[in-house]
Image: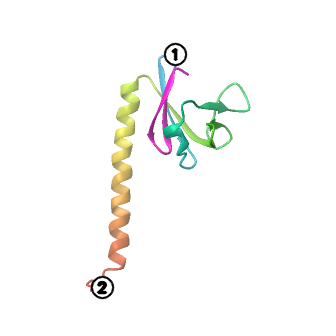
Amino acid sequence: MRGYGMFDDDVMSINASGKNRYYLVTTLFQCHSLQTSFSAGFKGDFSELCGGGRDKILTSEESCPIKSIFEFSSKEEAVATFEKVEVIRQNLRDEAKQQGDSKYDDTAE
């Protein structure tokens, strides 16, 4: 691993050294320490990492189970994909909020 960065509390980008490959890794739950940690490690049962919660990203503060790993051929492709997904996630949050608010709207007929 050459470097990593955080896009969200549950989405991490990884730049694999020597392979010119980029990965987006999602975790099963929010891992706040990934935003502030100076380093991170990985824990898996074999010589490769898998999703599904068995393998983990480790910081000095917590262990974050990996939900999914997505591979991209460039950093730009990974970032563009994340940005598209973020728009969809935000739209779903907004829609859910609007539906929740309409349940408590006393002016509805």
Is residue 9 one of those drawn in magenta?
A: yes
Residue 48 in the image, given as x and y percentages of width and height = 66, 27
Can residue 52 be seen? no
Image vertical order of residue 80 relative to residue 108, above or below: above
Image vertical order of residue 18 relative to residue 10, above or below: above
Can residue 17 be seen? yes
For label 1, the SS is: loop
Residue 108 or 63: which is nearer the viewer?
63
Q: Residue furthest top?
A: 18
Q: On the image, which quarter does residue 92 sit in?
A: bottom left
For the point 39% across and 38% down, which residue is it?
82
Is residue 66 one of those drawn in magenta?
A: no
Assign the C terminus to one quadrant of the image. Answer: bottom left
Residue 3 or 66: which is nearer the viewer?
3
Q: Main secondary structure of the magenta part?
A: strand
Instruction: Please tell me the numbered disc located at residue 64.
Output: none
- The residue indicated by pointer 2 is 106
Looking at the rendered structure, the kind of residue marked 2 is: Asp
Q: Which residues are magenta?
A: 1-14
Looking at the rendered structure, the kind of residue marked 1 is: Lys
Q: On the image, which quarter does residue 37 sit in?
A: top right
Residue 26 appears left or right of 46 = left
- The residue indicated by pointer 1 is 19
For the point 38% across and 44% down, which residue is it?
85
Specify few, some or many for label 1: CA neighbours under 10 Å numbering under 14, 14-19, or 20 or more.
few
Image vertical order of residue 68 relative to residue 30, above or below: above
Assign the N terminus to one quadrant of the image. Answer: top right
The disc, 1 or 2, on the residue closer to the chain's N-terminal end is: 1
For the point 63% across and 34% down, which residue is it?
50
Residue 12 in the image, given as x and y percentages of width and height = 49, 36
Residue 22 in the image, given as x and y percentages of width and height = 47, 25
